Image (cartoon, helix red, strand yellow):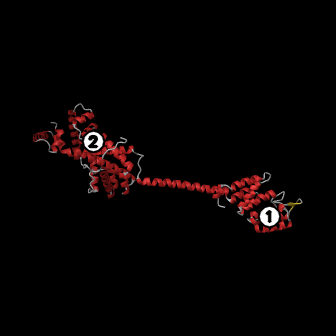
Amino acid sequence: MKGDTYSERELIEMIGGDSSHRETAIRYLMQEEIRSRRLSGSLAKLGASPVECEELVNDAFVALIMSVKKGSFKPGSSIWGYLYGAAKNMLWKLRRGKKSEVAMQGYVSITGDVDESVEDHIIRGERKEWLLGIFNQLTDKCRHILHLAFFEEADNQEIADQLDYKSKSVVSVKKSECLKALAKLLKSARSF
Amino acid sequence: MNFYDNIQAYLNNTLSAEDRISFEEEMARDNDLRMTVEEFPVILEAIEASAQDEARTMVQRTRVSFSGQERHPAQRRVLPLRRLSIAATFLVLILAGALIYANLKYSTPALIQSAYTAPSDLGTFQSDNVTNAQWADVMLTWENGKTEEALNLANDFLADHPGDADAIRRVAHLQFQAGNFEEALMLYGSIRQNRQFGNYADFHFALTLIKLDRLAEARDLLSSLAANEEHRFAEEAVGLLERLNSPWRRLAFN
């Protein structure tokens, strides 16, 4: 990658693509951030400590990935403008109070919704932890299949190729079983 | 049709009318399918939470791979200042050390102290093999710290021994030690031609000139002593000249 340069449009396409392209794009952007301190320099001017700067920059990168993958990143928007807006918004939330609790939740709102209250922010964080706990009860295979199918939006044939299944129909059956298993775990966790 | 593959299409209302009816009939028969459809929004939320977690891990991993290359702006400002202050501290310590060294070895009192020699037989004065009681009085008074009184007695002693080079040398020493450098200079000067005490008087005459800050004269005299190999104080004169001309003298407080 050394020496490569990418336009913002290319970077967005890479982030929206498979994990290897996404990692290349994030590495490229992170290198630029560390070289020029575009985000952390601005955050430091707003009073963020070195530790806060690092966490906020990381969180802003996560927000960018989620925004692109969910299709909510507006085409033509500036990547750095988005990252700065997201990081500043998270810093604002930290400053609003309950600093330590919010920091523990990490990134929650991928929309950077300024109107969200700190309390809502924390509740969302707790819900995320609860969902993660249930999702992690699935087998590695199931987690992988569901991730590829519903986050990477890979079709059954692509999943079969990636995970070495004999055919897409095997993936279809496996996916059904994983969905059922997750639904049961969610339902029983809620009733409990 | 695999109904589980079509849950999203069913919920998005993008199934054909025929498939939709078929899907709903299956849901009526299959409780698991119905439950999965009901839970589907939460399932997507859980997958998103997991993807977000994975993205965070990837971002952190990427940052760690650059560790050591980054520095917070505040740290960037602080670091040169810290380095400067460390350098300044070292500089101050080196300068202080140099000043202490220069003053211990090259100040005028240090030069004099290291070069000055008191007469070895100062305690007693004999004339015609008889110990002189008058000089014994002078020294007793001197040793009791009565400087003025001792110097008066010494002058009486000098008057009683006119032209005695040994007597002059002793009194010159007392005058020098009492800080009366003009008197000491005159006395040392008066016996520089003496065969027995002339060499001693030359060198201590030069030391007295240094004390009086008449450095050019002192240098001239020391140079001539140093050039004279037969002079008893030639070696001392060389050493004293070197120290007198040393650059360290510039750092010494005289």
Q: Chain of mark 2?
A: A
How far is the residue under mark 1 from the one under mark 2?
105 Å
At label 1, counting other C-alpha atoms closer than 10 Å, the crowd grade (few under 14, some 14-19, many 20 or more) is many
- Quadrant where the N terminus of chain A sits is top left
Q: In this picture, is A56 found above or below B16? A: below
Q: Is residue B108 left or right of residue B232?
A: left
The label shown at residue B187 is 1
Q: Nearer the viewer, residue B112 or A38?
A: A38
Q: Chain of mark 1?
A: B
Which residue shows up at 71% across the image and 62% down it? B214
Which residue shows up at 48% across the image and 55% down it? B81
Callouts 1 and 2 close, C-beta under 8 Å: no
Measured as percent of width and height from the top left, residue A144 is found at: 27, 38
The label shown at residue A17 is 2
Measured as percent of width and height from the top left, residue A185 is found at: 23, 42
Find numbered disc 1 in the image and state the secondary structure of the residue it sits on: helix
Which residue shows up at 80% across the image and 69% down it? B152
Find numbered disc 2 in the image and state the secondary structure of the residue it sits on: loop
Q: Please state which amino acid type lies under the numbered disc 1.
A: Leu
Labels 1 and 2 share a subunit = no
Question: Which residue, as the protein is rendered here, is positioned at the far right?
Answer: B128
Measured as percent of width and height from the top left, residue B155 is found at: 81, 67
Instruction: Answer with the quarter of the image where residue A24 lies.
Output: top left
Measured as percent of width and height from the top left, residue A123 is found at: 27, 52
Residue A99 seen in the figure: yes
Q: Nearer the viewer, residue A144 or B88?
A: B88
Residue B35 seen in the figure: no
Instruction: Answer with the quarter of the image where residue B161 lies.
Output: bottom right
The label shown at residue B81 is none
Q: Is residue A23 left or right of residue B92?
A: left
